[in-house]
Image (cartoon, rainbow, N blue to C red):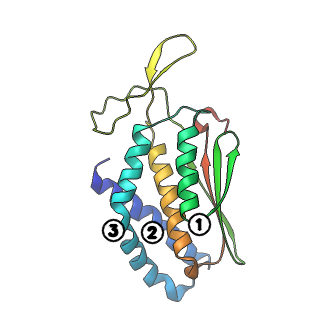
Amino acid sequence: MIPHAHVRVARWGLFVLAAWMTHIGVASADVAPDVRRRLDVCIDSQMEHWIGFYKTAHANPELSNDEVESATRVADAFFAAGLEITREVGGHGVVGVIRNGEGPVVLIRGDMDALPITEETGLPYASNKKVTRTDGTRTGVMHACGHDVHITNLIAVGRFMSSHRDQWKGTLMLIGQPAEERGAG
């Protein structure tokens, strides 16, 4: 993704979340105009951080059931944002929870695993990881369908929601899902 695409993805994801919060009454309607401004400030001030997080995730993919480093990155980011953390859920899954009073419970899931495909993008942060398949052949590993973006957006939403608890009520559960590609996580 080019940097402008990163910005569009982050803005869209957070904007949809804020609009949904207002619609179901988690955030009060009188706060809604301010939410968009806060989102813009948050995204603008943290975009370089999120691009770096994305590039690290992209360059370090892990296959289903092997998401040890990915799970650690997600758990560390959840912890830094002040979320309650449960590790090793469904394998290497990570659950982060923000309890913020009475209100709806919302769950957002982001996949963490990658695919056994050799990356040929030529990006400076391309995956160079190789694994040996069960038949003895070697293959590359890459995030070919956006799980690196899932992880990044999941963490960004957690950080934003944790730092804006005065704007909403309820419980937010964020799940870093392992082994989605195999349906095992």
Q: Which residue is mark 2?
A: 15
* The one of 172 and 76 positioned closer to us in this rendering: 76
Q: Secondary structure at mark 2?
A: helix
Disc 3 residue type (three-letter): Asp
> Percent x, y for residue 150?
49, 50
Q: CA distance from mark 2 to mark 3?
A: 13 Å
Q: Which mark is residue 82?
A: 1
Earlier along the polypeptide chain: callout 2 or callout 3? 2
Residue 111 visible here: no
Amino acid identity at mark 2: Phe
Residue at the location (59% across, 49% down)? 176
- Residue shown at 30% from the left, 33% from the top: 121
Q: Which residue is mark 3?
A: 44
Question: Farthest residue in the top direction?
Answer: 136
Please tell me whether mark 1 or mark 2 is closer to you in this view.
1
Q: Nearer the viewer, mark 2 or mark 3?
A: 3
Figure quadrant of residue 39? bottom left
Residue lying at 63% horizontally and 49% vertically, measured from the top left: 94
Residue 127, percent from left and from top? 38, 33
Q: Quadrant of residue 67?
A: top right
Residues packed near mark 2 inside 10 Å, few (<14), some (14 to 19) or many (20 plus): some
Q: Amino acid at mark 1?
A: Gly
Across and down, in percent, residue 38 comes to 42, 77
